[in-house]
């Protein structure tokens, strides 16, 4: 309960401090959509940059792509999404609200049964036996369970018929698979190598989203490692470790993270696990790591009629590579970062300060420039101009200095630079550390290097 209260506080802080707003709010909102504000867009961009640095920039054998959201619909036949990317849903006959049967069972069973391993008939029997009623109206009168496809459909061109039907992609992964040969040839890549992408994905989720945990439009950060059969277990273990290290290096507390193997594997999968986070709502998925055998490339070979074989340049051997997929939602990671960084501290004077202990590399603003009084603003603006080419800076001259520090703590700004009358005399300022609240006096000329040295990821 206490933790859930924290989620309410975080949602509220996000709204008041320009981090995240409800989508289309002036029209009463739209379920499971959220807009990032001026502070939130910096946070999310920094998270994406940190991921790209770790999984592309620092990996000589990984290559980035930015594939189209709208793909040839045959892609989704090959991937299996048109046939089976669906959730088991049922309608309450009384209030007409729609509900996911698997979620209803999970919430009741608390880990004792796994609905992912049940048929529709088994789920219906469980719901009847345990008298699981509608969370909206309390009545227990359900329609039979039906599978609803999660892909959003749209149509291309002027004629709206089945031949013009296309989909908003429900995952970015297929953009990496269909470009396997393009990347391999253009970059002269040798297996093992990886293709990574950050981009939007869309799913027609009907269940309550728990803020940005589950949304209908979200961003994924995905990396596919192409390797030989036989090397796959090695890369599966490697990516499990790399995915975990990335999170802890970002400052996520180890005790809030755990691995969870999937109970049920797809018929082609050799292994699959999630890294879960201990959210205010409880443990749930943050990212997935899958050993997918050579299923993805084989299916595209079958459906496109194009060979997806790779020829080993040393042995001449031809094979369709296996894939180790690592996939994490940028928005879900943003939620984890927000939850993990949120802190309420009691100060010596008894006051409480809310502070976001973001890793400095992902903090929305690296430094805030604060003139002690308004008549120091000219000098303060000079300091801002000196730092702004290097870092995202905030500038604030309104209100007491204490209140301005509190505001910066709430958006996790690691450094506050205060301009006072001594600054006019000797070109020095005080720099305050967000976490220790300690201040030291430094030369303005030293600021860029000093701050840069403390925000490295
Ligand atoms: N290509 C594999 C794939 O898409 P997934 O487990 O369905 O696998 C990967 O999604 C990640 O994308 C999840 O671990 C989660 O972080 C994020 N994700 C999935 N659905 C989401 C949603 N509706 N809203 C926000 N993030 C989502």
Image: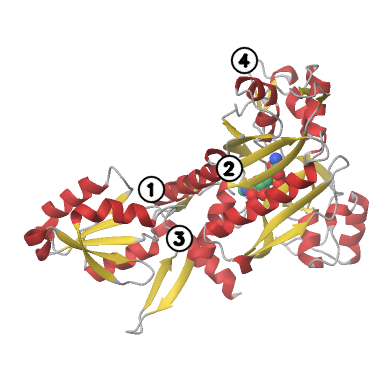
Look at the picture and state if 203 lies above or below 354: above
Mark 3 and mark 1: Cα distance apart in space: 17 Å
Q: Earlier in the sequence, mark 3 or mark 2?
A: 2
Decide if residue 254 is on the left or right side of residue 114: left
Disc 3 designates what residue? Answer: 358
Disc 2 designates what residue? Answer: 55
Disc 2, disc 1: CB below 8 Å?
Answer: no
Disc 3, disc 1: CB below 8 Å?
Answer: no
Disc 4 designates what residue? Answer: 158
Q: Earlier in the sequence, mark 2 or mark 4?
A: 2
Residue 84: quarter of image: top right
Q: Earlier in the sequence, mark 3 or mark 1?
A: 1
Depth-wise, is mark 3 or mark 2 nearer the camera?
Answer: 2
For mark 4, give the secondary structure.
loop
Depth-wise, is mark 4 or mark 1 nearer the camera?
Answer: 1
Q: Earlier in the sequence, mark 4 or mark 1?
A: 1
Q: Quadrant of the N terminus?
A: bottom right
x%, y% of residue 90?
A: 80, 50
């Amino acid at each position: 309960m206490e933790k859930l209260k924290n989620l309410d506080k975080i949602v509220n802080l996000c709204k008041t401090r320009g981090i995240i707003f409800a989508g289309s709010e002036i029209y009463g909102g739209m379920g499971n959509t959220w807009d990032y504000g001026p502070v939130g867009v910096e946070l999310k961009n920094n998270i994406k940059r940190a991921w790209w640095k770790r999984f592309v920039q620092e990996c000589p054998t990984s290559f980035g792509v930015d594939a189209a959201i709208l793909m040839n619909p045959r892609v989704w036949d090959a991937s299996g999404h048109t046939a089976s990317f669906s959730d088991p849903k049922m309608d309450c006959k009384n209030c007409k609200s729609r509900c996911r049967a698997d979620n209803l069972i999970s919430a009741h069973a608390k880990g004792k049964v796994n609905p992912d391993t049940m048929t529709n008939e088994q789920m219906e029997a469980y719901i009847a036996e345990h008298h699981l009623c509608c969370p909206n109206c309390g009545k227990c009168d359900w329609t039979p369970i039906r599978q609803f496809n999660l892909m959003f459909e749209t149509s291309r061109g002027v004629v709206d018929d089945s031949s013009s039907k296309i989909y908003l992609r429900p995952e970015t992964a297929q953009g990496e698979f269909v470009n396997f040969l393009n990347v391999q040839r253009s970059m002269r890549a040798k297996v093992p190598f990886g293709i990574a992408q950050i981009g939007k994905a869309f799913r027609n989720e009907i269940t309550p989203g728990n803020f940005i945990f589950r949304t209908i439009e979200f961003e994924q950060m995905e990396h596919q490692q192409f390797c030989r059969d036989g090397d796959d277990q090695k890369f599966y273990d490697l990516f499990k470790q790399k995915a975990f290290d990335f999170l802890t290096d970002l400052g996520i507390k180890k005790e809030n993270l755990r691995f969870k193997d999937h109970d049920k594997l797809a018929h082609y999968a050799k292994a699959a696990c999630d890294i879960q986070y201990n959210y205010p709502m409880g443990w749930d998925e943050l990212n997935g790591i899958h050993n997918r055998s050579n299923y993805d490339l084989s299916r595209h070979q079958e459906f496109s009629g194009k060979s997806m074989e790779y020829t080993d340049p040393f042995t001449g051997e031809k094979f369709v590579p296996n894939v180790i997929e690592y996939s994490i939602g940028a928005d879900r990671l943003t939620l984890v970062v927000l939850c993990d960084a949120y802190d309420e501290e009691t100060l010596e004077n008894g006051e409480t300060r809310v502070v976001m202990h973001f890793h400095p590399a992902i903090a929305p603003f690296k430094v805030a420039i604060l003139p002690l009084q308004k008549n120091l603003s000219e000098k303060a603006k000079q300091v801002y101009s000196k730092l702004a080419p290097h870092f995202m800076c905030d500038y604030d001259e309104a209100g007491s200095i204490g209140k301005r520090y509190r505001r910066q703590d709430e958006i996790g700004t690691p450094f506050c630079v205060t301009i006072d009358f001594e600054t006019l005399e000797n070109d020095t300022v005080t720099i305050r550390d967000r976490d220790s609240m300690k201040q030291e006096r430094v030369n303005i000329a030293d600021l860029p290097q000093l701050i840069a040295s403390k925000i490295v990821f």
